[in-house]
Image (spheres, rainbow, N blue to C red):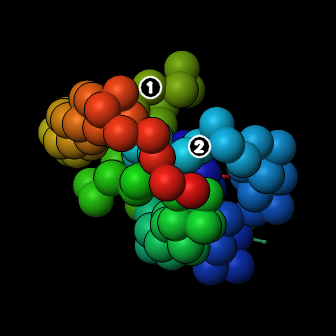
Amino acid sequence: MVTPEYNHSHPASVKNAIDWHYTEWRAEPVGFVSSGGISGGLRAVEHLRHVFAELHAVSVRDTVSFHDAGRQFDAAGQPADPEMPAVAADKLLGQLVWWGRALRSARAEHPYPA
Ligand SMILES: Cc1cc2nc3c(=O)[nH]c(=O)nc-3n(C[C@H](O)[C@H](O)[C@H](O)COP(=O)(O)O)c2cc1C
């Protein structure tokens, strides 16, 4: 999920996109990329973890977050300082793949008891 943060949470458009689906999220991993002002969108991410718990999805611990997002990208939309987001993305994707594999095996072995 990619989300900005407005008034300490995710925007309604992100929630609406999530709510279009229900069983599709079940026993699937979810990773977050966020942007915001001083918080980098981390409060929006923490609110989304509650939403995904209700949907039986597993939210991945590490995130990629862009603090002071207005200054973090050049005119071409590329990160002004790519090193930090690259390290964070590596962790996020590693955990997303780990959970994806683990959950796929678990779903194949036992039907999820929703
Ligand atoms: C109405 C409004 C509320 C905002 N609230 C927050 C906030 O609570 N926390 C935060 O980190 N950034 C906040 N921001 C900054 C936005 O997250 C930031 O502008 C955004 O990440 C960049 O996307 P944008 O181009 O859609 O504004 C707010 C911005 C606006 C316009």
Q: Looking at the rendered structure, which numbered label has been put on residue 90? A: none
Q: Nearer the viewer, residue 108 or 86?
A: 108
Is label 1 in contact with label 2 (beta carbons under 8 Å)? no
Q: Whole-percent x and y of residue 40? A: 45, 64
- Left/right placement of residue 101 relative to residue 37 reads left
Give the residue pinned by disc 2. 25
Q: Whole-percent x and y of residue 96? A: 30, 37
Residue at the spot 30% in from the left edge and 32% down from the top edge: 109
Answer yes or no: is residue 72 visible.
no
Q: Whole-percent x and y of residue 4? A: 62, 56
Q: Quadrant of the C terminus?
A: bottom right
Q: Quadrant of the N terminus?
A: top right
Residue at the spot 46% in from the left edge and 46% down from the top edge: 112
Q: Whole-percent x and y of residue 61? A: 28, 59
Is disc 2 placed on a helix, strand or loop? helix
Residue at the spot 55% in from the left edge and 46% down from the top edge: 26
Ligand 1: quadrant of the figure: bottom right
Say which amino acid is labelled 2. Trp
- Determine if the C-beta at disc 1 is less than 8 A from ligand 1: no
Q: Nearer the viewer, residue 86 or 48?
A: 48
Q: Nearer the viewer, residue 104 or 90?
A: 104
Q: Residue furthest top?
A: 76
Is disc 1 placed on a helix, strand or loop? loop
Sequence-wise first label, 1 or 2: 2
- Left/right placement of residue 10 relative to residue 37 reads right
Residue at the spot 44% in from the left edge and 25% down from the top edge: 78
Q: Is residue 83 above or below residue 66?
A: above
- For disc 1, the neighbor class at 10 Å (few under 14, some 14 to 19, many from 20) is few
Give the residue pinned by disc 1. 78
Foreground label between 1 and 2: 2
- For disc 2, the neighbor class at 10 Å (few under 14, some 14 to 19, many from 20) is some
Say which amino acid is labelled 1. Gln
